[in-house]
């Protein structure tokens, strides 16, 4: 069944929704919806709403909510990934894969050797791709795309308070500790949050690595081959996702 995002949260006592903008255009013009058709609505809150089309016009689709169900397809704990961005043609596939792998927050990273500088328009594209990938993979919560962050600010952010510990992993080619060895040293059930960091294809500078190590980051390598940004980001996120699902 086709899934569509509504821009605002649906209230518990709400029985009708007006779908507008690109989502309404896709439902009305591309799928040629007619009264009586059923779709699933999402508002990013973790709820999934079964709805029936009541009326269709050029700019909006009126729907009636038939039922609602809370659906949880998230990882057990938040996974936050800060990454340098690859060149534009390779960004969409990376974002779609990271959403499928369960990343909850994506932070475009500015580092010394980064080639691509995140711009407001590119962040808008990333958010649009997140929404499309969320509909495709069955998640009901939207991964967030944060404003761009400088590397020094990112690695020095304090760990959250409360029970459990935060795991900080930074992918760095040539480092002696394989990712699998580091994950085996920790129990997934004792981790409250995971932060991941992937740099540009030129790697991080020695000064950046020293700064990260001084703030609790563990340097890991992802194999003996040189990986592109999007490959490294998806490999790191995928391995952590599988590891967390074991809890």
Image (cartoon, helix red, strand yellow):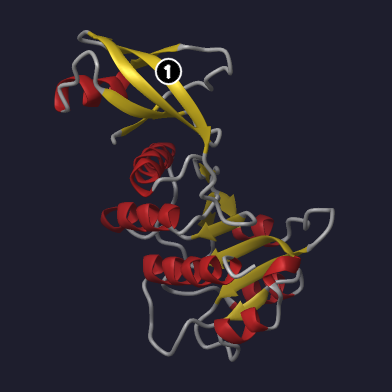
Residue shown at the point (22%, 13%) measured from the top left: 35
In this figure, which residue is indicated by the disc labeled 1?
65
Q: Can the viewer see residue 140 in this picture?
A: yes
Q: Position of residue 68 (x, y in %)?
A: 49, 27
How many marks do you count on the picture?
1
Residue 56 pos. (x, y %): 23, 10
Instruction: Tell me if residue 30 comes above or below residue 172 in the rendering.
Output: above
Which x, y percent locates residue 36? Answer: 24, 16
User: Relative to the observer, which residue lies in front, 160 or 134?
Assistant: 134
Relative to residue 88, is residue 198 depicted above or below? below
Observer-nearest of 185 and 85: 185
- Residue 60 lies in what quarter of the image? top left
- Residue 200 visible to the viewer: no
Q: Nearer the viewer, residue 210 or 141?
A: 141
Q: Quadrant of residue 27?
A: top left
199 to 41, vertically: above or below: below
Residue located 36% across and 72% down the image: 228
Q: Is residue 197 left or right of residue 227?
A: right
Determine which quarter of the picture holds residue 208.
bottom right
> What quarter of the picture does the N terminus occupy?
top left
Residue 153's place in the image compared with 179, above or below, is: above
Residue 225, given in percent of the width and then of the height, sits at: 38, 86
- How many residues crowd around disc 1 within 10 Å: few (fewer than 14), some, or many (20 or more)? some
* Direction right: furthest residue: 162
Task: Write the residue at 40% across / 67% down.
Answer: 229
Q: Secondary structure at mark 1?
A: strand
């Amino acid at each position: 069944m086709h899934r569509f995002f509504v821009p605002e949260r649906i209230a518990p006592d709400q029985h009708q929704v007006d779908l507008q903008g690109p989502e309404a255009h896709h439902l009305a013009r591309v799928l040629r919806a007619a009264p009586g058709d059923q779709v699933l609505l999402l508002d990013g809150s973790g709820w999934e709403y079964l709805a029936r089309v009541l009326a269709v016009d050029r700019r909006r689709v009126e729907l009636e909510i038939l039922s609602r169900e809370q659906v949880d397809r998230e990882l057990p704990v938040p996974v936050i990934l800060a990454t340098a961005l690859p060149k534009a043609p390779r960004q969409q596939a990376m974002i779609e894969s990271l959403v499928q792998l369960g990343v909850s927050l994506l932070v475009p990273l500015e580092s010394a050797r980064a080639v691509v500088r995140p711009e407001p328009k590119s962040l808008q594209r990333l958010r649009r791709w997140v929404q499309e990938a969320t509909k495709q993979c069955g998640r009901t919560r939207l991964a967030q795309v944060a404003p761009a962050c400088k590397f020094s600010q990112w690695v020095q952010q304090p760990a959250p308070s409360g029970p459990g510990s935060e795991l900080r992993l930074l992918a760095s080619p040539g480092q002696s500790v394989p990712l699998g060895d580091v994950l085996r040293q920790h129990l997934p059930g004792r981790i409250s949050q995971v932060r991941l960091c992937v740099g540009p294809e030129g790697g991080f500078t020695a000064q950046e690595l020293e700064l990260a190590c001084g703030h609790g980051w563990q340097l890991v390598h992802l194999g003996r081959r040189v990986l592109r940004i999007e490959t490294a980001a998806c490999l790191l996120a995928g391995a952590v996702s599988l590891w967390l699902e074991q809890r």
